[in-house]
Amino acid sequence: MGKLYINQDKLNEKNIGELVKICPFNAIEEADGKLSINAGCKMCKLCVKKGPKGVIEFIEETVEKIDKSKWNGIAVYVDHTEGRIHPVTYELIGKAKELAGKINHPVYAVFIGSSIEDKAEELLHYGVDKVFVYDEKELKDFRIEPYTAAFEDFINKVKPCSILVGATTVGRSLAPRVAARFRTGLTADCTVLDMKENTDLVQIRPAFGGNIMAQIITPNQRPQFCTVRYKIMTTAERQEEKSGEIIRGKVDSEKLKSNIKVLNTVKKEKEEDISEADVIVVAGRGIKSEKDMEMINELANCLDAQVAATRPLIEAGWIGPKKQIGLSGRTVKPKLIITCGVSGAVQFIAGMNNSDHIFAINEDPNADIFNVAHYAIVGDIYQVIPQIISDIKNHKKIV
């Protein structure tokens, strides 16, 4: 890694024009006889190699090696609303226990809020070694400054090597801010997590439009941050007996001050959520017209299921955006999911491949969806679905 440095005192009218022209990305800009490099720079270093000697230099940045032995433990941020713990927390505890077992590290939970200490006891039933509780009246509502201060205090005192955060509204706001405080990396929406013997967290997620599954590590910084969506990991088993301990954290009151004043809170009305559905019927690009969604809805009604769709149908406006499955939509884990005309893009599969039973219908025998399906029908959905509906109504066996 490195940076480009412009020796402004070596600039003149001739080499300014030369350098502006030499950049193929228009990243070198001139203003008042001085040069600057904008965000268009690709670090091709053509300005260094072909430009006037010594005017622009590439300076290598030295990477300081961190002492990884000083960072110990896998921490989970406890996502909650007024003390009601979000189920993604228990999923992350399950994964944290698995990762910690590979390197013989403890599992921590960091719980930030107000009047939450009694709720923290529940976490001890899930195998957490220590629950760090920051219980202050200033933390009643989620406000980014005091929550960041409490999280930062936890990291400075405990030094966990890795931190798992749920990819909820709060988690997506809090995790990057805390990671920036420690100048460390963060990988969002991970679908797979693994741990190396040297405590490097392997964070896996689709990249470049889903064409590859990127394996991302943060070898030179600690802690390592990642966010994981709900329904991606397996929930930790609750034990009858409690284990572990609760430790009360304390932050200076000055750090808990916020520029945000909460005037009122309005509870969101409960609405149908495909993430909580037991049975889902998914419409894919194989559906030719919006009118044909009636066929999908009829099948869903026969199964008392919810209807969902892939991204192309959402963009076409045939169904609401909250019904989209995939990395840019919802993650689901139903008992049964039936995909109708779904090809199986990486982003879609990442959002549903943990379903108990996957039943795929597609006329292309090479469709990627069949790689994860438990049951498959190769055929035209316009023939197969009406037949399934008829068989269900007549109480016939489908497969």
Image: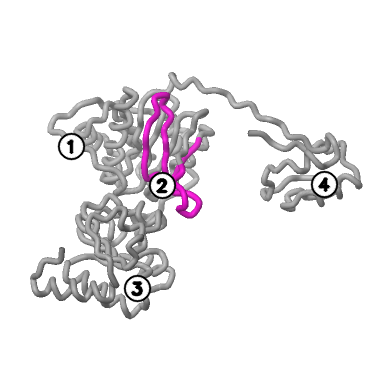
Residue visible at 68% across and 30% down in the picture: 60
Mark 3 residue crowding within 10 angstroms, few (<14) / some (14–19) / many (20+): some
Q: CA distance from mark 2 to mark 1?
A: 25 Å
Image location (x, y in percent) of residue 211 = 47, 52
Residue 75 position, x and y percent, is 35, 32
Q: Nearer the viewer, mark 1 or mark 3?
A: 3
Q: In the image, which disc is placed on residue 19?
A: 4
Where's residue 391, x and y in %?
13, 72
First along the sequence among labels 2 and 1: 2
* Residue type at numbered disc 1: Arg
Distance in Å between CA atoms under marks 4 and 2: 40 Å
Cβ–Cβ under 8 Å for marks 4 and 2: no
Q: Which residue is mark 1?
A: 238
Residue 13 is situated, as x and y percent measured from the top left of the image, at 91, 47
Q: Amino acid at mark 3?
A: Ile
Looking at the rendered structure, the kind of residue marked 4 is Leu
Which residue in the structure is indicated by mark 3? 287
Between the C-alphas of marks 3 and 2, the distance is: 29 Å
User: Given contact means CB atoms under 8 Å apart, are the residues at marks 1 and 3 in contact?
Assistant: no
- Label 3 or label 4, whichever lies nearer to me, is 3
Tell me which label, 1 or 4, sits earlier in the chain: 4
Q: Which residues are magenta?
A: 185-214
What's the residue at 32%, 39% (across, down)? 78
Work out which quarter of the rendered image holds the N terminus and state it.
top right
Mark with earlier residue (4, 2): 4
What amino acid does circle 2 point to? Answer: Asp
Please give the name of the residue rendered at 31% of the width and 22% of the height, measured from the top-left corner. 104
**Nearest to N terminus: mark 3 or mark 2:** 2
The mark nearer the N terminus, 1 or 3, is 1
